Amino acid sequence: MYIRATISPALGSSVVINEGEIARFLVTLIVSNESSLQANDYQVELWHGSRNGQWKSSAFSPVSDSTLMIHDASTIKGTRTHAYSLYLPSNGVHRLDFTLRYRAGSKSPWIWSKDQTHAADGQIIYKPKSLLESIGFEALFSGVDTSVIVKTEASQVTGVDTFSLLSSAPVLRNQWSSVVVGQPLLLQKFYSLVKLSSPWMGPRQGGSTFVIDKDALLLGYLRSDGRHVVVLSVSGINCTSYIRSGNGRVLLKSRNDTDETQAHRAIVATGLDWQRTVDAAFYAARDISTRKESSPRAAVLHRTRLAEATPAWHETWYDGLGFCTWNSLGRELTEDRILNALQDLENSGVYITTLIIDDNWQSLDNNRRWDKFEANANFPQGLSHLTSEIRRRFPNVKHIAVWHSIIGYWEGIAPGGWIDQNYKCKTVKWHGGWDVRVVDPSDINRLYNDFYNYLKAKMNRFLTDSGVDSVKCDVQASLDEFDEAADRQSLGYAYQNAFKVNSLSHFAGRVIYCMAMQPAIFFHSLLPQTSPRTLVRNSDDFFPDIPSSHLWHVFCNAMNNIFTSHLNSLPDWDMFQSSLPQYAGLHAAGRCISGGPIYITDSPGKHDLSIIRQMTALSTQGSKRFVILRPSRISLPVDPYISYNQTTLLKVANYFGGYRGSSLLAIFNVSETLESSSIVSLNDFQAIIEDMKYIVRCHSTGRVYNGTSQDDLLMSVSLPVAGWEFMSSVTTKTISRDEGSVELGTFGLISSLAGAAAVVSWNAYKETGRIVFSVNLKAVGTLGMYVSDLPSRSVGELFVTIEEQPVPVSSVRKSGQDAKVLEIDVATAWKELGISTGFSNEVVIKVYLE
């Protein structure tokens, strides 16, 4: 017999509540339908105790639907769900550890959840009533090095204290120095973002002793008094700093690349909300970095180059579906293969707006070094001929990007080649004594300017660009891999500036930073908010043939967003193949919640149109253009302290719109071996407004859930290995009338995962004996409108218009997934009626309810 338990708060998690508050525990048992037992027949117990105290059990009671409803949002077939609750007073303890056991009747053996799921104990932390809103640095760390100068900074986030740390970093010539920040006091658990390799960052989580295996850029931890603390190392061109562990202490590790004393720098912030605490740390770091970079030379550079930048219309760059050649066409790139792939996409009904011509188009020598601007022999008529053909044959492709390395190619410049002969070059050492040829810092700006002019294929400055209009600049971490400090400093500063200012001048910032997760690049180029938003690759590649790499990729990107969401960029979660067996939906849900761009890299003839259509919608600006429905923000994990391969589900939240906008939640099972489950509450969604009424829709089933109050909107979710769910939470509006009230709301385009992000605005009001329900959309697909009394209505009595034209009855139906959802096939009606929005990019749908 199948039986599985889910508890909230989850095992392995730490939840903070106020001292004296009664803790509410909820459990759902998912059991097979073959079981004849009822809810009262099962025994469910919480085992709990303090750290050094004796443990005891408390029994759960079955939940009555009249007092509390926990909706079954699982997709496991042949099962039913029983719900239980327990309310436990604090009894004066400061922390409560707990686990769960249950059994099917008094004669069956007990099942311990920790044995079934390998989950650690959960924790309830009771926040003391005496806890001060403001706290001094001395209450956060002990054993601080006497050389560390601590300064209280003006915090830009209410309720968060912010401190800057400074200590001398001596000149050690290619060596690292360190300084002790101190032993973190009251540490319960932590998360950190570490350097997995030179180009890439990734997460680490841990318990009450601070130990990490690699250098970190960011550390956050929860204390036993409920306070969160964040440590952010601050770097620049001259000095690179990381966080490291040593005997449980927090250390700063820095490399000074100059001939003068520099500084270990860090920001420490503390508050009662982990997200707001991270925000405060980055705001302070941005202020410090701005002051450090405010030299006269840098100011002139910014004034000159930003004035040359062409204004960007972000919709086409960020919000169109992209296609990349890397996995799809591999290393053998040719003009014909690219054109044939684009034709295949169009023939298959996949309409992209951005093409990325990845690696393997450049002219190289036999040692992977860049020779000249012109494309290689596989493009006999040149790159400009290819881009002209693309724009002629595929007008839906609005943007063409090409790949290049920050130093030209993976192994630099070809000695004796065209570039070597026409630009000042020099040979330097890297990777432990190997020679690499690079363009001299004094000439790199000229090379970038000339190269980008070549890519744009401009005949003269009065002609419209017909060529490349965006770039993917890769291998950027190579700027930190030169052996000598003088080369790292001079080349790093010159190359970063040359790339940034020329990409602004030529492409209005339409660039992708790749392999660029280096502190100097983050703080010098990506943290300042003085230019248009770029894109930045958010993690290392995943490997399609390695199952665990798919789960790690989603987990790593979700956690990396904690850092990259504060940069002047959008996180690029990388391309993927829509036809990937088992994992395509997982990747699609990750990209849709991320807040960043979406690219596919499908091989010709291998497309999963269902996956592609769930990530996109049809643009109102043309029938052969897909747009992605990107949320307004960058997604964040609901709980940064959960670990990879843990049976606690990974929840990733995002939001679209302004006041009363739509909240989105993607849920992933990132355990490599076990089914995982969770009880989802409305509090897991972002920007929930107190006392507002909400409804939640699950994408996989189409079912809609509501509750009598915000605390009672609860859903039990169980997912198999690599399983996922996508939820949308929207507000409702109640219209009163003589026959009774009706509750209305819209989930946007339910044909798309993030379809709620298609809603520009909506309203409902009474008008001369009827109710008008109006929705403004920025794209078309299948619109889902919640009408609480829809089961008692017939579709025939509804009058629906699109741009004031009646919608054919065949395009209006009651949902087969939820009786209270009205589905309107806006895409079909749009096409049949031949509607055009003209200069507007919105479409208005109205439903008239008698």
Image (cartoon, rainbow, N blue to C red):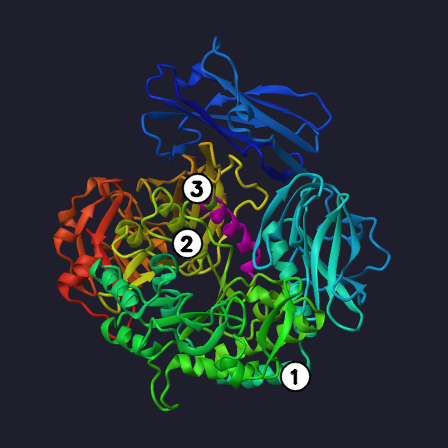
Res 3 → quadrant: top left
Query: Height in image: 802 above or below 696?
Result: below
Say which mark, if any, is on residue 297: 1
- The secondary structure that most of the magenta stretch takes on is helix
Q: Nearer the viewer, residue 630 or 318?
A: 318
The part of the chain drawn in magenta is: 550-566
- How many angstroms separate mark 2 from mark 3 (CA)? 18 Å
Given this view, does label 3 or label 1 mark the residue nearer the observer? 3
Mark 3 Cα-neighbour bin, 10 Å: few <14, some 14–19, many ≥20: some
Label 2 SS: helix
Q: Nearer the viewer, residue 400 or 491?
A: 491
Report whether 424 appears left or right of 77. Answer: right
Q: Nearer the viewer, residue 36 or 694?
A: 36
Query: Height in image: 521 above or below 593?
Result: below
Q: Residue furthest top?
A: 107
- In the rendering, at what x and y percent does residue 464 appear? 34, 85
Mark before the other along the chain sequence, 1 or 2: 1
Which residue does the numbered mark 3 point to in the structure image? 547
Amino acid type for the residue under numbered disc 2: Arg
